[in-house]
Image (cartoon, rainbow, N blue to C red):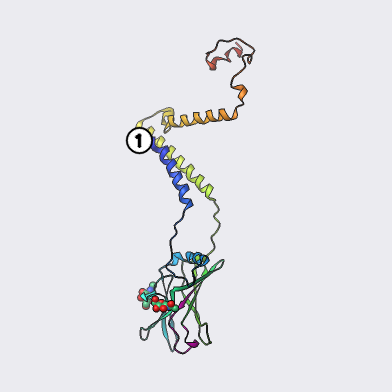
Amino acid sequence: MFLFKTMPLVSTILILIILLAGGGQGDDKTDCRLVKESESERKVLKLLEPLKNRDFNLTVKTDKDDYTYVFRVCGAAVGVDGAGLVQINNKNEKKTRIGNYTNAQAIGGSDWVMLIYTGGTEYESHCNKESRKAIIMISCDRRTSAGDLSLVLEDRERESDCFYLFELDSSAVCPVLQSKLSTGSILLIICFSSLAVYLIVGFLYLRLVVGAKGVDQFPNYTFWTEIGNLAADGCDFVCRSRGSREEPPTYRGVSTEPLGEEPEERDDHLLPM
Ligand SMILES: *[C@@H]1O[C@H](CO)[C@@H](O)[C@H](O)[C@H]1NC(C)=O
Ligand SMILES: *[C@@H]1O[C@H](CO)[C@@H](O)[C@H](O)[C@H]1NC(C)=O
């Protein structure tokens, strides 16, 4: 019985918790270090949270070369300190840093995110011996949480600003679909289903275990009737106009009637006998 006595209290607390939980959401940080700290770039990085610490491997084999690229979102790829994208030469196992996740930039649009890792190993002869840079273009694809990494091009036949361009599909960067149900209606549904479960379980418990009959099968019957009475009193107080509370003695045309009469029997004499 204790359980059912505390039920209304417990459900009130639960509803409060649900309401409060909606307000504050976790503020976890990604490990990417931005070249220039900025609020908008942090927001873009937050989108990539579901992809964090996943490896994306890509092997590119030509007549001359055999490379494997390993990309990690905001984490060290193949354990190379600070490197988010590493090129492994499969012939001699040599690892080349393409870009640091500790020197990142993040740019986002409606259904794409461009992640840029700068500060890689310098080119030996190309590109004015600049340091390498990786651009990873992540596009929205609702069918996959994370697709395959692909290399679009390595642009190094130029004076400066060379880059490796990669592509990746992911649902993480898709625009949020507007939920058909608002938060309010979801809360209402939760409230009503809790109420239904409470009533059904309470009813079954009282009927089958306690063996209650009639209105006593209704869980916390006294509690709820008290609530009902209080609500009715409140409504009475608010809605009723002041005059009718103290009825004039001439109300029924019979001016003198002794006070303290049972209110239920007052109208009996009006009925045809
Ligand atoms: C990616 O490649 C690296 C290096 O070859 C390897 O250590 C890692 O296990 C691979 N990851 C996956 C998911 O294949
Ligand atoms: C990239 O990271 C490595 C290791 O942390 C570091 O030595 C290097 O200076 C970084 N590059 C830049 C441009 O900061």
Residue 253 at what x, y percent from top left?
64, 12
Residue under the image location 36 percent in, 75 percent down: 79
Q: Could you tell me which quadrant the C terminus lies in?
A: top right
Q: Amino acid at mark 1?
A: Phe
Q: Is residue 47 magenta?
A: no
Where residue 262 sits in the image (x, y, percent)?
A: 52, 15
Query: Which residue has dot 1 on it?
Result: 2
**Among the 4 quarters of the image, the one containing residue 248:** top right
Ligand 2, seen in the image, is in the quarter at: bottom left
In this rendering, position of residue 94 left or right of residue 174: left
Q: Considering the numbered disc 1 on the image, is that residue within a helix, a strand or a loop? A: helix
Magenta residues, start to end: 116-130
Query: Front-most of 52 and 81?
Result: 81
* Residue 187, placed above or below residue 119: above
* Residue shown at the point (48%, 64%) measured from the top left: 46
Is residue 231 placed above or below 136 in the rendered structure?
A: above
